[in-house]
Amino acid sequence: MYSDRIKQLSYKHGFLACGIAKAENLPLASRQLKDWLDMGYHGEMAYLENHFDKRTDLRNLVEGAKSILCLAFNYFPEPRNKTDFKIARYAYGDDYHIVIKEKLFALMADIQNLIPSFTGRAFVDSAPVMERQWAERAGIGWIGKNSLILRKGVGSYFFLAEIICTIELDADKPETDHCGTCTACIDACPTQAIVQSQVIDSRLCISYQTIEKKEPSTLSIEESKSWIYGCDICQEVCPWNRFAEANNEPRFSPRDIVDWSAEEWRIASKDLSLIKKQITRSAMERAGIEKIASQGFTQLNATKP
């Protein structure tokens, strides 16, 4: 009974989906994570080696955890004009960590009004939580060959979030795979970062190179395909994303930098405060002003007549 009521509350706060999983160990995900780390596919993201026991069993992260509420929130924007300076769609607006966390706290307050004994912790890509594995288990979608969660009738342009709680709730059935024989994402990756289905060598990934890598990207202009921050290529070619619809969250409205022309980037090359103003309190802060500037100016030079 409570499970359905909680899902209805999540829709009230703008989430497009809510699924529930039982808090337990993830033995298969544990082996897969270990193999991925052993291959060095995480590159410079050493933090992914930490808290292995918490990543694979959330009961080690939240004491008394019984259930995981897995939630999805749409970030797909209205269509944009094509530009030589591309930014991943999830970073167009305000920082999703802040926006989604606020919504999670509001949802938790409503759940506590419904169930006074409810206690839990909210997470948005900020703790050792294997979000995609839990989302799949909770029926939000399935892990596609590009390692992202895909949902029927929606696609993959959505954020994942979790509320790990200490009450028993009815668990949903895990979603099954619906990628079939399609290899569009694997075929389209310009750096061949998808080394096998659901396995990404981050070191080759444009998103890793333009965000996580501390030093400037080592990709050529031809490989980077004009991406300044992140990359959406494997999502753009996915047939399931033909169902994507624009979100209605005002704080995810694109900032001006998303549509900057070459001339605007040229002006910013002489005044980095313009870039700072654009990325403050956005997801792009993770890469930093200097890295984004460097990548933008590299592309600027490449587009000179």
Image (cartoon, rainbow, N blue to C red):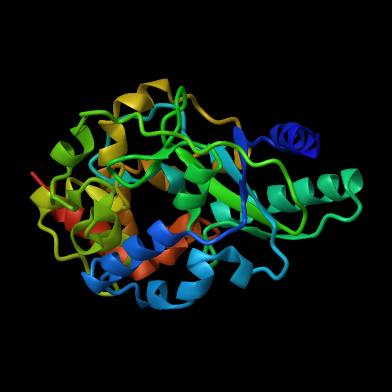
**77 or 208, nearer to the observer:** 208
Q: Residue at x 47, y 43 (%)?
A: 136
Q: In terms of depth relative to the viewer, which is nearer, 81 or 229? A: 229
Q: Is residue 176 left or right of residue 94?
A: left
Q: Is residue 131 visible?
A: yes
Q: Is residue 251 above or below residue 201?
A: above
Whole-percent x, y for residue 265 in the image: 30, 52
Q: Which sits in the foreground, 92 or 109?
A: 109
The image shows a total of numbered marks equal to 0
Residue at 75% from the left image edge and 50% from the top image edge: 168
Image quarter (top left, top right, bottom left or bottom right) of the N terminus? top right
- Residue 197 is left or right of residue 58, and the answer is left
Q: Quadrant of residue 27?
A: bottom left
Give residue 251's position: percent from left, percent from top.
Answer: 60, 43
Q: Quadrant of residue 156?
A: top left
Question: Can residue 93 be seen in the rendering of this structure?
Answer: no
On-image quarter of the C terminus: top left
Q: Position of residue 141 (x, y in %)?
A: 47, 36
The relative height of residue 25 versus residue 51 in the rendered view (above or below) is above
Q: Is residue 119 left or right of residue 16?
A: right
In this rendered view, identify the residue nearer to me: 266 or 298.
Answer: 298
The residue that appears at 83% across and 55% down in the rendered structure is 118
Q: Is residue 80 above or below residue 35?
A: above
Residue 127 in picture, x, y percent from top left:
54, 67
Place residue 157 in its image quadrant.
Answer: top left
